[in-house]
Image (tube, rainbow, N blue to C red):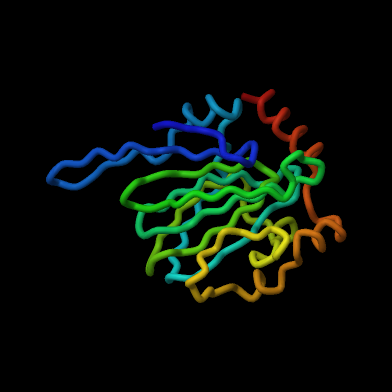
Amino acid sequence: MDIRELTVPDAYVLDLVPHGDPRGRFTEWYRADVLAGATGFGLTLAQANHSVSARGVLRGVHFALVPPGQAKYVYCPSGRVLDVIVDIRVGSPTFGVHDSVVLDSDEPRAVYLSEGLGHAFVSLADDSSVTYLVSTGYSPGREFGIHPMDPQLDLPWPADMEFGFSAKDQAAPTLAEAREQGLLPTMEQCTARYAELRSRA
């Protein structure tokens, strides 16, 4: 398992190593020691989620208020998705920057994003499964979104696809509107949160 930081700081992609034989395939899709070696604190597991999406379903851009925020470890065991991470931390040198990774079952990868980052994905195949481990449980009053089609973000969604959105994502504000409304986490809040997590490790 190899791990490397993405263009968005505090987000990582992990190249996984599948082991196959005539019986099938086995993959270690999460290793706490590998993640902690890169971040300095790893992932506190509070909840595990699983979604199945038809081709063109787009989920996000989602984030949670910091503290505590919500770190995510994302894996696609079946199908194929384009996973997108956005730096929405006000005061970050890479504020508004995004990176993307294709997650699929043929060449398995996982993505980790720290607290304070925005997350979205679009399903590139029918019945794509996405499982994600999260550091805090669902808390509707602390979870928000940014419109995935915000032209300021210019996210790399496929041009030849008809998208399906939830009503909540369709009604989400743009990045600028979310900033004006005081919804976005600050880099200062996130840095303090990361330091707190490292001190507990």
Q: Quadrant of residue 9?
A: top right
Q: Quadrant of the C terminus?
A: top right
Identified at 43% across, 70% down, the residue is 55
Q: Taking 194 as reference, is 62 above or below it? A: below
The percent position of residue 74, horizontal first and vertical second, equals 49, 48
Q: Taking 126 as reference, is 188 above or below it? A: above
Q: Quadrant of the N terminus?
A: top left
The percent position of residue 117, horizontal first and vertical second, equals 67, 47
The percent position of residue 133, horizontal first and vertical second, equals 51, 47
Identified at 85% across, 55% down, the residue is 182
Given residues 62 and 2, the one toward you in this image is: 2
Identified at 75% across, 43% down, the residue is 67
The percent position of residue 97, horizontal first and vertical second, equals 68, 48
Given residues 106 and 168, the one toward you in this image is: 106
| 2 lies left or right of 46 | left
Given residues 138 and 26, the one toward you in this image is: 26
